[in-house]
Every structure is written in C-alpha cells, then in structure tokens.
C-alpha cells in the first residue's frame, strides 16, 4: 500500500465554471507508461504537443495541448502531466474520469495496473508535494495561496516577493547568523578551561545586537505584509442618524447602504472592502446604538456590538449638528463607556465628527472632521486609519506574511531580548543564553517549515484551492 504522500494525484487545476482553457493536472512517480496509455504516444519533456484526448473507443473527447515535466524538473518535484483543453466543466470532468479510468487499466504485457493508486487531489496537495519534495519552503507555499487570494495590487506584489524567496532568504540569513552565535556560546561552554574568551574575541555582544537590529527590520516588513494580506476590519459605530451609512457609501464610492432621514434605517451589518494605498480595509456599517423596543432593531444593535468586539479599529461617528443636545451627549457618553469595556486596549477608537458642511461649530472638537455628504475630510480619515494600524507608506521590499509568521518573529524577538540580558549579566549565564538562542532558532525555522508539525501543514494546505 502506497503512502498517501506517495500516491499519484489528479485534479482539475482551473477554477470551476466555463472558460477558454481548462487544465487537468496529474503528479506522481514514473508517469511515462501512464502518459503513453492515455495519449497513445510518448511526449517530449517540457514541449507542448497538440493532440486529441480520446475516450476508451478512441473517439476524441476534445483536442488540446499536453505538457510533460519529468522529475525533478517540475513544480511538485515528481513527474507532472498537464492536459490543456477547452474550459467547459463537462469536458474537464470527462478528461478527469478518463485519467482515472486509464490509471486503473492493467498492462496487457506485465499485467500490472497502469498507475496504481491514482486519486483525486485534496485542496493544496500539489503545492504540498512541492514543499515535501523541497521545491519550495513553507513560506513560499503560503505565498502561492496569498497571490491567488490577493485583493489589491500591493498585496499581489508582496505575495510575489515572498513566492520568489525574498522573505525566506532574509529568514535563513538571520537563522544562519544566530546559529553562528550559538556555536560560539556552545564552544565557550564546552571548553571553559581555555584561556581564550571566545565570546569577547568574537564580539558576541555586537553580533547579538546586529541580530536584533536585523530582526527588527524583518519584523517591520512582515507586519506590513500581514496588513496587506489580511487587511483590517473597521467598524463604523454611533447613534442613529449620525451618518454611518453615508460614510460607508462615501468610503466605498458606491451606494451600498440605504440612507434615509429615518432613525434606525440600518437594521443589519453592511460590509464592503475598500483599499487605501493598497491596504485592504473591510468597512462595516452597523445599526445605530440606542435603547429600543423594536425587536428587529434590537437584533441589529446586538449584531453591531458583536462587530465592534471583533474590530481591528472602530470609527466612533458623532453628529456635529447635535453636539449640544443633552440627550445626544448622554448617548455618546454611554456608547463610549460601553466600547471601552468591550474592546481590548490595543484596538484604536477614532472619533469622527460628521456633517461639518452643516455647521460652523467644528473647531472645538478633537478627532477627524468630515462630511460624508460632500467628501470633505475623507482623505484625512483615510490617512488616520493607516496611521493607527501601523502602515508605513513607501516601505520598500514588503513581502506577504501571515499572522503565524509575525507571531514567530515576535517569539524570536523575546528570546533575543532574554539572551541579551543573560549575556550582559555580571556572571554571564551561558547555559540560559544558549537555550534562548536555540529557542530563537527553532522559532525562525518554523516560518520556512524546517520544524513544522503535521497538524500545522494540514491546516495550511487545506485552505488552498483544489488543483493547486
């Protein structure tokens, strides 16, 4: 019985639906005999061949291109066959079924099955094969999915940076420097009787300081990359008729939410993703927050609070035309208190004062002044949003990073901080120093997949599309 990772796999590699071209991809070991049985001829390596794709009776199902990539010079590191046909779902399903049928046939001479164990690929399994066969590391594998899912040009460019190996090379260079320092520490531990102080002679303090500086730069770019990949969820909150739906429409540049003078018009969340300087911003409009006896409105208000609790940032919208009304002031104070209780202290709350076009009493307020109706102040709000989430415009060499990458880098940062403390201690705690460096190296290696649990791999690749 073949190991699951050794079984040949097949899948439709293009998106569901109709298209000009559709691809069926097969990956496995020793595909040569299978290719001959399927296509009735031998293919030249890495050369497109136009030919018919025939059924069992020799009747053409379609005509298209076949490309054969013998191992190890393929995406997965195994033999790979790609059949490029017309992109109709029925045609591709027929080709897929034909591949499985041919694989199960017995060789008339040897009697063996043509391609033992060929099965439909699981999501992300082709990319997982590439990782397992050392064609790419884990960060590059994740970048493939990020490139497919990119929602902005900046996100696509940063994913390409990661896919090309820029992120991995910086991680590996940092790991190698850390290993070198570990070697010096271990040498001092192994030969304590030597007169030569390995650490002082090799400027261990300087090496560790440079490691921390390099890590800071990588962490900064990785954090920016994570913003480009994940974006941020921004919830617009406030009392009824403050202009929340108008603000959503103004930011999105489209009439997405219904706007009327009637308080309580918005009954449920309305979400739209926009981009500011390439950063995806998931803007959520919510029901007005107030006391109500309307059961439907109460459901909307409860959902508004749920959205606020999961926000990366909150735009607390105030109505300038009602800023002196006692009941309105009390309502804003109540909302501010409730937001403070529900949100983590690290989640920014931006006070936004709307309807600046309808009143001259704006100067005494703090926060962002704008008019959702005229667009005045929107650019200031966009800049403020990027500022509070930590985006730095013009950052060079940003690469896609995931939350797990940033978390791993922060663990490395913590270990290096502890290592510096042990190295600076009057009685240098070299055992503890060596352990912190080892843990830092381990955290770095998790990023590229040198040390990675099978459970984590399962989670990562299960989120890929089938055929990739």
Image (cartoon, rainbow, N blue to C red):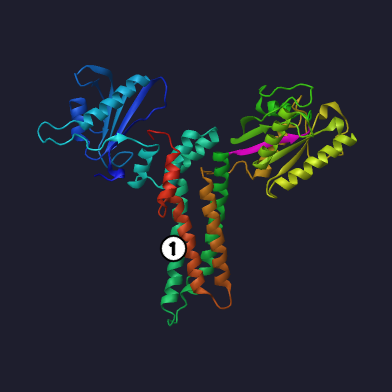
Q: Label 1: few (<14), some or many (≥20) within 10 Å?
A: some
For image coordinates 54% across by 63% down, the residue present is: 416
**Nearer to the camera, 326 or 40:** 326
What's the magenta bit mostly, secondary-structure-wise? strand
For image coordinates 59% across by 35% down, the residue present is: 280
Relative horizontal placement of residue 363, taking residue 180 as reference (left or right): right
17 in magenta: no
232 in magenta: yes
In this view, 389 is above or below 298 = below
Q: Secondary structure at mark 1?
A: helix
Relative horizontal placement of residue 145, taking residue 308 as reference (left or right): left
Which residue position holds label 1? 179
Q: Position of residue 19 (x, y in %)?
A: 40, 20
Specify whether residue 443 is in view: yes
**Nearer to the camera, 296 or 250:** 296
Relative horizontal placement of residue 19, taking residue 293 as reference (left or right): left
Specify whether residue 366 is in view: no
Q: Position of residue 314 (x, y in %)?
A: 70, 40
In this view, 86 is above or below 99 = above
Q: Position of residue 49 (x, y in %)?
A: 25, 25
Q: Position of residue 382 (x, y in %)?
A: 69, 35
The magenta segment is: 231-239
């Amino acid at each position: 019985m073949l190991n699951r990772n050794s079984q040949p796999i097949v899948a439709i590699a293009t998106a569901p639906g109709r298209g000009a071209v559709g691809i069926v991809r097969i990956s496995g070991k020793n595909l040569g005999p299978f290719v001959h049985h399927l296509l009735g001829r031998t293919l030249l390596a890495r050369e497109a061949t136009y030919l018919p794709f025939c059924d069992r009776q020799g009747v053409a199902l379609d005509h298209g291109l076949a490309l054969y990539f013998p191992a190890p010079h393929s995406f997965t590191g195994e033999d790979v066959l790609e059949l490029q046909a017309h992109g109709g779902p029925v045609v591709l399903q027929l080709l897929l079924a034909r591949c499985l049928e041919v694989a199960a046939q017995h060789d008339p001479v040897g009697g063996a099955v043509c391609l033992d164990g060929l099965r439909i690929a699981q999501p992300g399994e082709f990319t997982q094969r590439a990782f397992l066969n050392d064609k790419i590391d884990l960060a590059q594998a994740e970048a493939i999915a990020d490139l497919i899912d990119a929602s902005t040009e900046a996100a696509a460019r940063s994913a390409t940076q990661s896919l090309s190996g820029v992120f991995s090379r910086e991680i590996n260079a940092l790991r190698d420097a850390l290993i070198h320092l570990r070697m010096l520490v271990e040498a001092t531990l192994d030969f304590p009787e030597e007169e030569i102080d390995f650490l002082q002679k090799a400027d261990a303090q300087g090496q560790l300081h440079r490691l921390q500086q390099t890590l800071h730069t990588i962490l900064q770019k990785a954090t920016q990359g994570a913003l480009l990949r994940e974006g941020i969820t921004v919830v617009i909150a406030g009392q009824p008729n403050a202009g929340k739906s108008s603000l959503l429409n103004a930011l999105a540049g489209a009439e997405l939410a219904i706007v009327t003078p009637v308080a309580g018009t918005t009954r449920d969340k309305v979400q739209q993703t926009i981009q500011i300087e390439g950063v995806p911003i998931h803007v959520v409009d919510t029901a007005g927050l107030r006391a109500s006896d309307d059961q439907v409105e109460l459901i909307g208000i409860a959902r508004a609070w749920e959205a606020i609790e999961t926000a990366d940032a909150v735009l607390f919208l105030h109505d300038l035309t009602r800023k002196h009304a006692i009941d309105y002031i009390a309502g804003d104070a109540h909302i501010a208190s409730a937001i403070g209780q529900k949100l983590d202290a690290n989640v920014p709350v931006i006070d936004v004062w709307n309807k600046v076009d309808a009143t001259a009493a704006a100067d005494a307020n703090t926060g962002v002044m704008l008019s959702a109706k005229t667009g005045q102040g929107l650019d200031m709000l966009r800049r403020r949003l990027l500022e509070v989430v930590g985006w730095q415009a013009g950052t060079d060499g940003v690469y896609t990073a995931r939350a797990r990458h940033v978390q791993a880098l922060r663990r490395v940062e913590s270990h290096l901080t502890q290592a510096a403390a042990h190295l600076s201690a009057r009685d240098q705690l070299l055992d503890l120093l060596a352990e912190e460096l080892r843990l830092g190296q381990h955290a770095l290696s998790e990023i590229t997949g040198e040390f990675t649990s099978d459970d984590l791999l399962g989670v990562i690749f299960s989120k890929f599309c089938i055929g990739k």
